[in-house]
């Protein structure tokens, strides 16, 4: 498989870092889906509508975490690359 021009290999560190952040991102996405699904079900019942709204807010806040996770991964990979160059 050919590498993209912007991709720089830093060996095993890159693979480990990438897998950790992909796992964190997948777990975050799973929780987002759960909050929105349960929140949607709660909206069928008047007594649970407030809790459902809270779950939608929680899911929305977690949507904010998606780019934060990506930025953290990019910073982490950049730092690992700098360490491997030294």
Image: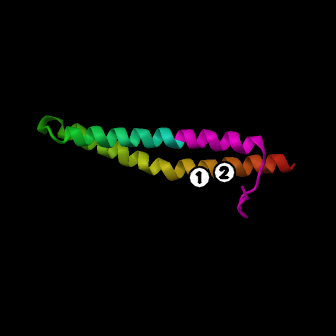
Residue at left 43%, top 39%? 30
Q: Quadrant of the N terminus?
A: bottom right
Residue neighbourhood size for the residue with mark 1, other residues' Cα within 10 Å, grouped as few (<14), some (14–19), many (≥20): few
Residue 31: x percent and y percent? 41, 38
Residue neighbourhood size for the residue with mark 2, other residues' Cα within 10 Å, grouped as few (<14), some (14–19), many (≥20): few
Residue 24: x percent and y percent? 54, 39
Residue 9: x percent and y percent? 77, 51
Q: Is residue 62 left or right of residue 47?
A: right
The numbered dot on residue 75 is 2
Residue indicated by mark 1: 71
Callout 2–callout 1 Cβ contact below 8 Å: yes
Q: Which residues are magenta?
A: 1-24
Query: Secondary structure beneath disc 2?
Result: helix
Residue at left 22%, top 39%? 41
Q: Quadrant of residue 12?
A: top right
**Residue farthest along the left direction in this orientation:** 46
Q: Is residue 2 left or right of residue 63?
A: right
Visual colour scheme: rainbow
**Residue farthest along the bottom direction in this orientation:** 5
């Amino acid at each position: 498989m050919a590498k993209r021009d912007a991709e720089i290999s830093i060996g095993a560190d890159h693979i480990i870092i990438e897998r950790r952040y992909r796992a964190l991102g997948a777990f975050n996405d799973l929780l987002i889906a759960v909050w929105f699904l349960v929140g949607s079900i709660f909206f069928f019942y008047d007594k649970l509508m407030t809790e459902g709204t809270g779950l939608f807010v929680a899911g929305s806040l977690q949507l904010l975490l998606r780019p934060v996770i990506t930025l953290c991964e990019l910073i982490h990979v950049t730092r690992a690359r700098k360490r491997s160059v030294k």
